[in-house]
Amino acid sequence: MTSGQRRLLGVATAALVVSLSAAACGGDAKPDAGSTSSASAPAEAGSSAPAAASGEIKVDGSSTVGPLTQAAAEIFGEEQPNVKIAVGTSGTGGGFEKFCAGETDISNASRAIKDEEKAACEAKGIKFTELTVATDALTVVVPKENTWATCLTTDQLKKMWEPAAEGKVMSWKDVDAKFPDEPLKLYGPGTDSGTFDYFTDEINGEEGASRKDYSPSENDNDIVTGVSGAKGGLGYFGFTYFEENADKLNAVQIDSGKGCVAPSVETAQNGTYAPLARPLFVYPSAAATKRPEVAAFLDFYAKNINVIAKDAKFIPLNTEQETKLKSDLEALKGLAG
Amino acid sequence: MAAQHRATATGTGRSLARSRPRYGEAAIKVVLMLAALVSVATTLAIVAALAEPTIEFFATVSIAEFFGSTTWGPLFNPPSFGVWPIIVGTLEVTVIAMIVAVPLGLASAIYLSEYATPRVRKIFKPVLEVLAGVPTVVFGFFALVFVTPLLQQIFPFLNLEPRNALSAGLLVGIMIIPIIASMAEDSMAAVPNGLREGSYALGASKMLTSVRVVVPAAFSGIVAAVILAFSRAAGETMIVVLAAGAKPVFTVNPANEMATMASFIASAGSGDLPVGSIGYKTIFAVGALLFILTFAMNWISARLVQKYREVYD
C-alpha cells in the first residue's frame, strides 16, 4: 500500500466515522418526532367507535385476577385504542393498599376485601363495590394409570405438599398406608404463579409455604407431560387446563370434610368444590366510574365477561352471576351520582 | 492502476520522517481504543452492578447460611438460602459436558491438525465452526424433545425424569466441542514442523508423534481451550432451563431434574419479584458467585498457559 493510498484510506475512515456518528444523532432525533406525532393522534383516531374515550386507567392487585383484567384490557384495546390500561400485580393486599390511598381506579382481588381495608378506604372517602367476575378452580391431576387416588382429602394433599414433607414423603405409601409403594413425583407451578400462592395458602395454610423438591414450571404443558409420564405423578393447575387434557389425566376429587367433590364448572360456580375453587373480584372505585374511559371499560368488561374469562382460562359466570354483575355495576354508577 | 504506479514512483524518493500530522490515523486510534474500552467498561459495570445488591444480600443472609446448608428455595416461605444444590447442579452439567467435549474436541483437533489432508480440513473446520453458531435454545429444545425420549427408550433402567441433568449435559457438551476443537487445532497447527520431523527421524509413528510430541507442545493452548469451554458450559442457561428443569434438589444423580445457578437466575429474573426484596437480591448474589467461578477459571487458565507455554524458534 502506498502512502497516497494510505492517506485516502485515512480520509475515508474519518468520513465513515463522521457519517456514522451523524447517523447515530439522526437515530436519536427520530423517536422524538415519532412521539410528538403519536401524541397528537388521539384526536383523529377512534372515529368508528360510538363513544371514543381516551385516558389512562390504573389497575392493580391480585396476580391471579391480573391476567383476566389484562385479557379484558387487550380485547377492549381493539375497540378503544386510546385508553391506556396499566394492570399491576402487587397482590390482593398490596392492591387494596394503593386502591384505598386513591392511587388506582380498579383493584383486582382473589378474596373479598377485609374489614380493616374497608376502614382504610372509608377514611379516604373512597366508595367502591365488589364485582364477581369469574371463578378460579384448581384441579389436582394424576395420570390415567393411577387407580388408587380417585379422591384425596385436603389433609392428604397437605401431607404431600407441606414444607415438612420435603425429602420425607417420597412414596404414595407415605401419604396413606393404603396406597401402593409408588414413588411420588410432584409437579406444580413455580413460585411466581398466583396458582402456587392460592394452593399453598389453602392446602398448606400459608401463602408460599411448600416443599421445594417438586418440579416447578410456569408452563402448564410441562405439568401435563410430567404427570402423564410417571405412574406416581401428581400435579395441580387451573381447571380449564385440565379440561383440555382430560384424555391424558384424571382429576382427583377433593374431600374437605364434606365428602368427595369432583371439580367441574357447576361445583366451582356454586362453591361446593371447596377449598380449591374461589370467586375472583374486581373492585372499581365509584369516583373513577364518573370518568368516561373507566365507565366504558367496566361496561365492556361486564358485557363480555364470559368471553374474557374463557380467553384468560377461568371458569365463566353462570347466568345468575352474570346478571348480578351487571346490576352491581349499575348500582355502583348510581353511587357515584 | 496508473495512479498507483505514479505514487510508488514518487514515494521511493521521500525521506522516512513524517511529512505532516496524520489526523485520520489519530481518529482511527481513538475509535479502536473506544471499541476495546466498551468491553472493559461493561465488565466493570457488571461488577459494580453485582456488588451492591450482593453486599445487601449478605447483610440479611449470613455467609454461613449461604454456604453451610443444602436446601435452596429463596422464593419459598419460609425462604432457605443453602446454595449448594445449584452449585452441585451447575458442576454436574459442566462435568457431563466436559466428559463429552474434551475427548471429542481433542480428537477432532488432532485429526484436523495431524491427519486430515488440507482439502478435508478446508471443509471440516468451517462445518465444525457452524456448530458453534447454533443457537443454544435449539440445543435445549433438541435435548428436551429428542435426546431425553431417546435415552428413556434405550436405557429404561436409568429412570430418566422428563427433565434431567444428563441430556442437558450431553447437549452442553456438544455445544462446546467447537470451542475446544477449533482452539486446540489452532495451537497444534502452530507447533513448528521441525518437532514433527525430528520425531519421525527418531522412528516415531504418526500416532506417537501426535500424542507425545504435538499435544505436549501445544499444551498451553489446549488448556486455554478446555478452560474457556468449561466457563462457557458453567454459564450456559438456555439448554439447562429447557432440558434440565428448575428443581433445586441436592443430588448428584444425573437422571434427576435439577437447577443450576444460571437457570435459577433465568427463572427468578423473569418473574415478578419486587425490586429490593430479598428474592431479588438473591439473583445478584448468585450472579456474583457465578461470575467469581468463571473469573477464577479464567485466572487459572491464564496461569496454566503461562506455566506451560513453550516457545519455539
Image (spheres, coloured by chain):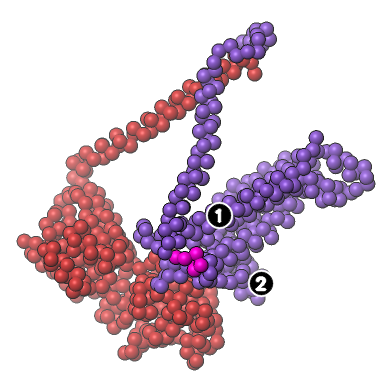
Local SS, label 1: helix
Q: Quadrant of residue B1?
A: top right
Position of the C terminus of chain B, as image quadrant, is: top right
Q: Which residues are magenta?
A: B61-66
Q: Nearer the viewer, residue A70 or B100?
A: B100
Q: Is residue A21 magenta?
A: no
How far apart are the two marked residues, 1 and 2, measured between alpha carbons?
Answer: 37 Å
From the image, tell me which residue sits under label 2: B155
Q: Quadrant of residue B196?
A: top right
Residue lying at 83% horizontally and 47% vertically, measured from the top left = B213
Q: Is residue B19 above or below residue B215?
A: above
Toward the left, the furthest residue is A337
Between discs 1 and 2, the one toward the N terminus: 2
- Give the crowd class for mark 1: few <14, some 14-19, many >=20 residues within 10 Å: few
Query: Pointer 2 indicates a residue of which chain?
Result: B
Instruction: Tell me, by letter, which chain the rendering colours purple.
Output: B
Give the image location of residue B68, x and y in percent.
53, 69
Toward the bottom, the furthest residue is A178
Residue lying at 79% horizontally and 38% vertically, measured from the top left = B312
Q: Is residue A29 left or right of residue B44?
A: left
From the image, tell me which residue sits under label 1: B292
Q: Quadrant of residue A274?
A: bottom left
User: Which secondary structure dominates the residues rendered in magenta?
Assistant: helix
Query: Pointer 1 indicates a residue of which chain?
Result: B
Local SS, label 2: loop
Give the image location of residue B201, x and y in percent.
92, 42
Residue lying at 31% horizontally and 90% vertically, measured from the top left = A258
Could you tell me the amino acid type at mark 2? Answer: Phe
